[in-house]
Image (cartoon, helix red, strand yellow):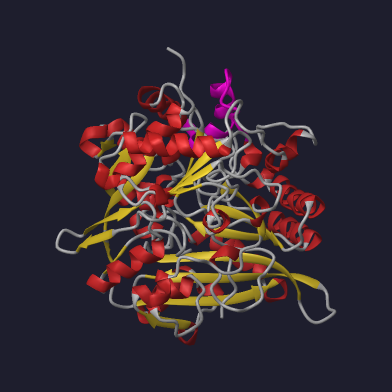
Amino acid sequence: MKEQAVSFCQKGSKKVEPFGNNEEQNFNVSSAQIFFFPLLFLFSLQPFPGASQASIHETFLQCLNKNLNPSDQNSSILYAPTNPLFPTVLQSHIRNKRFNNSTTPKPTLIVTPVRETQVGAAVLCAKTIKIQLKIRSGGHDYDGTSYVSDVPFVILDMFNLRSIDVDIEHETAWVQAGATMGELYYRIQEKSKIHGFPASVCTTVGVGGHISGGGYGTMLRKYGLSVDNVVDARIVDVNGRILDRKAMGEDLFWAIRGGGGASFGVILAYQVKLVKVPETVTVFRVEKNLEEKATDLVHRWQLVADKTDNDLFIRLLLQPQIAKKNGPKTVKVSFISLFLGNADRLMSVMNKDFPELGLKKDDCKEMSWIQSVIYWADFDNGTSVDALLNRVPKGVNFFKRKSDYVQTPIPKDGLESIWKKLMELEKIGLVFNPYGGRMSEIPESETPFPHRAGNIFKIQYSVNWNEEGIEADKKYMDMIRKMHGHMTPFVSKSPREAFLNYRDLDIGVTRNGKDSYGEAKVYGVQYFKNNFDRLVKVKTMVDPENFFRNEQSIPPVSP
């Protein structure tokens, strides 16, 4: 069993580590402000003036029926807090226990459509009763923005909309937003052993949120991101209309491929372009600690990881640990790889570009691409591909994630300072994900995702914990913020870039009021760089009254 990164992606029975590798400042705040999230979520919400939850439920149901054909009317898609199943439906797609306690504000209603027309009606009804609509496809957003709010809200949960239609003849697939990436991988392998899709390592991630935020996986050096392989989409707009690419226009189609779909509408489905994979791929995992010249190896990795063969992806997982029982602290570095080819060719590439690692043929495991998906998702050896259909991750706990990009190799003395900080904090893990290849060939403006050429690798910061309560939250949040602060000299600047799919409310929020543009620009330029203003223009065009909003959404501007 391999060590896994993000706790809610763990499938096995091994002990959960306190940090991880999966899976994505200019904002100055006081110590009081820095805990605005998630502490604002701890305050109880008052009912709507003059309206009880029961009356809201009844009003919403009447509105749905008014906007639907009789064949589409279905009261069972609504869950009010009085429904015994309400807690189960709410909690089944919460992946971070920081946002799942007795004082966390709960939605006034959960809508679980089973037909696309019901999504459009739900949008119109939320507008009618003037309530915030939160859109959830898998619940893996790191800071809970799809299912928590500090104002009264309704959750539109897409988990019932998860059909997948794979067309091998045309090498495409239509996949609905509520499907998981594991389900998509499974349906592809049913039809072909030489096709795949470049997307999440974590197989329980929902398609809607993952792709609309960019979509990151181990084949990005060969094929780019998920959004680089999207050819069409279906979306419900603010007027309840169902639009495909032709109907929505190229500006909106551009925006929902990396700009976050929840700012512009409700993603119903994406049509994705399948990619070719060889019948045999190869994986390896080599671990080194500081006593085994890990510093030299990490420094060398920075010089080759983004320049080597595009078929090769080598991720680094960096973890503080005790070298021996009761011994001194050290840092363990795991070199984890996917190679789109056999072991012999992999050895040829490694001996040419990275001989310092000392990779041996015995370290390599050949397998099919779908088996590599199982391997990277951290299932036990020999696990059936049927496990990809499991939508419920194990090991859900409390966690926080942050991200950075590195554009200049970190010198050895810089790496040594990082090791010192990791050992001091003890609970923080880092993941280095290499770029280069196809990522460097696509212009920054091609999609809203701008982190292309010039970036050597992306960093994910991770901390997991099991203790409940505000004190534990503060303790571990302080840890990861200290680590993030320590990395300032080594990462991108002006702006300090961040990855939208690693949602991080620390870098700024908007209250969606009069200064929404100014507030949003703080985080917007970090997520989108020069693409932020184009996203604002699209938002202003398609949703000028800012119905689709959250704590880090794209704002419209006044005429």
Horizontal and vertical percent for residue 100? 65, 53
Q: Nearer the viewer, residue 259 or 447?
A: 259
Q: Nearer the viewer, residue 484 or 61?
A: 61
- Which residue does the image show at 52% across and 71% down from the upper left? 336
Horizontal and vertical percent for residue 546? 46, 26
Specify the quadrant that holds the N terminus: bottom right
The answer to whether residue 264 shows anywhere in this view is: no
Q: Which residues are magenta?
A: 508-530
Whether 510 is among the magenta residues is yes
Q: Is residue 273 left or right of residue 353?
A: left
Q: Is residue 512 left or right of residue 201?
A: right
Dominant secondary structure of the magenta stretch?
helix
Outermost residue, left side = 169
Whether 144 is among the magenta residues is no
Horizontal and vertical percent for residue 413? 72, 56
Specify the quadrant that holds the C terminus: top left
- Which residue does the image show at 69% across and 53% down from the upper left? 101
Outermost residue, right side = 326
